[in-house]
Image (cartoon, rainbow, N blue to C red):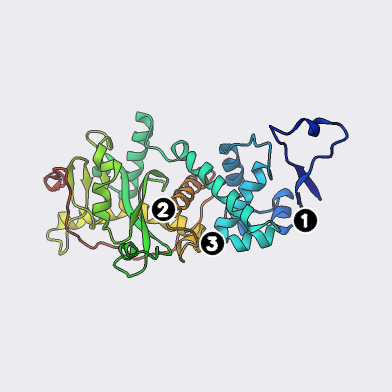
């Protein structure tokens, strides 16, 4: 049995008396199975969906100088178990024997702390060497030197939510008729996310999410001479960012067919990245999140941060196979776009 006393920075003077016994904020029973697993250096994957190395890397990123409450390590474990159990507060408070209101408070606080670290974990290539390494990786994935200037692969995925009861809730229903929020991400050749944009309702098409995202509006990436790979749901663009898509079906000519084959090999890495994240947090991405829809973008961003942490720590899971979505949509944008079809040719 371990006891963690709360330390009050502005406590009354009488609490400074040597005869005053500080009230105990909580009693944590370290024989709770999930805590026992962690503190006994056992495998953490079954309970937390992350390896011990990944959990350690996450804790090193978070604020460990917490002198009140349950302590940063145990709060981080509660957050991870909450994700692993499908974002269900009732499950966490039963397993940890903690009041549900406190679980809710801890989960929201740690989620915000994880999201606050996103720029340390999810970022564009910071040096020319990083960019060259990424481009070489895409050329190897594609199996052709024509892709040696690829600087990422982009796509969107839908996260199932419980829609708001207001009339606006209908705009969250995507074309597969379930309510969702869209995550747009760009990944490198290893499946690490280098840019994410999340929050649009599921009714909005991938191409429209792109044209309203900072990646498109600011046009700071990719660097000149480099391009981002995208599937057929996006337009082939040269301006404001160079976006290369496969030739539309039916494909005519051997050259176009070969191009599409090489393009598919390289661009499929973003689908694998989504697949790995969905496999790791299966109960998050394969059923409706049991949180308010305004909190969903924070949860998704936190999962993307954890995904990158896991890849950096060598904590890899095999993604489930998913069908490729090449649906077309009308391209609408307030920014003058220049086709990249001739550049692709």
Q: Which residue is mark 3?
A: 86
Question: In this picture, is 179 found above or below 20?
Answer: below
Q: Which residue is mark 1?
A: 31
Real-space Cα separation, disc 2 to disc 3, in angstroms: 20 Å
Question: In this picture, is 332 found above or below 57?
Answer: below
Q: Identify the secondary structure beneath mark 3.
A: loop
Q: Residue at x 42, y 45 (%)?
A: 192
Report whether residue 262 is seen.
no
**Residue 237 image point, x, y percent:** 18, 46
Q: Which mark is residue 185?
A: none
Q: Residues within 10 Å of mark 1 (few under 14, many from 20)?
A: few
Q: Residue at x 24, y 53 (%)?
A: 207
Q: Identify the secondary structure beneath mark 1.
A: loop
Q: Residue at x 40, y 63 (%)?
A: 164
Q: Nearer the viewer, mark 1 or mark 2?
A: 1
Report whether residue 197 is seen.
yes
Question: In this picture, is 274 found above or below 19?
Answer: below
In depth, the one of 24 and 343 nearer the eye is: 24
Q: Residues within 10 Å of mark 2 (few under 14, many from 20)?
A: many
Q: Earlier in the sequence, mark 1 or mark 2?
A: 1
In depth, the one of 209 and 169 nearer the eye is: 169
Q: Identify the secondary structure beneath mark 2.
A: helix
Q: Quadrant of residue 162?
A: bottom left
**Residue 119 image point, x, y percent:** 44, 37
Real-space Cα separation, disc 1 to disc 3, in angstroms: 23 Å
């Amino acid at each position: 049995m371990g006891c963690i006393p709360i330390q009050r920075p502005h406590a009354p003077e009488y609490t400074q008396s040597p005869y005053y016994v500080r009230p105990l904020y909580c009693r944590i029973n370290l024989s709770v199975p999930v805590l026992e697993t962690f503190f006994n250096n056992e495998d953490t994957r079954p309970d937390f969906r992350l390896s011990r190395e990944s959990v350690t890397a996450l804790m090193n990123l978070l604020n460990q100088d917490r002198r009140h409450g349950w302590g940063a390590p145990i709060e981080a474990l509660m957050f991870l178990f909450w994700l692993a159990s499908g974002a269900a507060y009732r499950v966490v408070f039963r397993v940890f024997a903690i009041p549900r209101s406190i679980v809710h408070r801890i989960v929201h606080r740690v989620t915000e702390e994880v999201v606050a670290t996103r720029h340390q974990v999810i970022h564009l290539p910071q040096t020319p060497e990083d960019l060259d390494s990424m481009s070489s990786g895409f050329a190897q994935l594609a199996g052709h030197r024509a892709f040696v200037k690829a600087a990422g692969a982009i796509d969107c995925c839908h996260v199932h939510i419980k829609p708001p009861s207001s009339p606006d809730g209908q705009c969250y229903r995507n074309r597969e008729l379930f309510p969702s929020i869209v995550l747009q991400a760009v990944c490198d050749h290893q499946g690490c996310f280098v840019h994410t944009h999340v929050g649009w309702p599921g009714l909005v098409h991938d191409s429209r999410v792109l044209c309203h995202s900072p990646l498109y509006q600011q046009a700071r990436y990719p660097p000149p001479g480099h391009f981002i790979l995208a599937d057929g749901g996006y337009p082939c663009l040269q301006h404001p960012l160079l976006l290369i898509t496969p030739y539309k079906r039916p494909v005519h000519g051997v050259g176009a067919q070969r191009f599409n084959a090489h393009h598919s090999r390289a661009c499929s890495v973003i689908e694998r990245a989504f697949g790995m994240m969905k496999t790791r947090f299966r109960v998050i991405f394969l059923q409706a999140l049991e949180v308010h829809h305004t909190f969903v973008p924070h949860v998704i961003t936190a999962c993307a941060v954890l995904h990158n942490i896991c890849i950096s720590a060598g904590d890899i899971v095999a993604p489930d196979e998913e069908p490729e979505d090449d649906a077309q949509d009308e391209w609408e944008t307030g920014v003058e776009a220049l086709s990249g079809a001739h550049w692709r040719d």
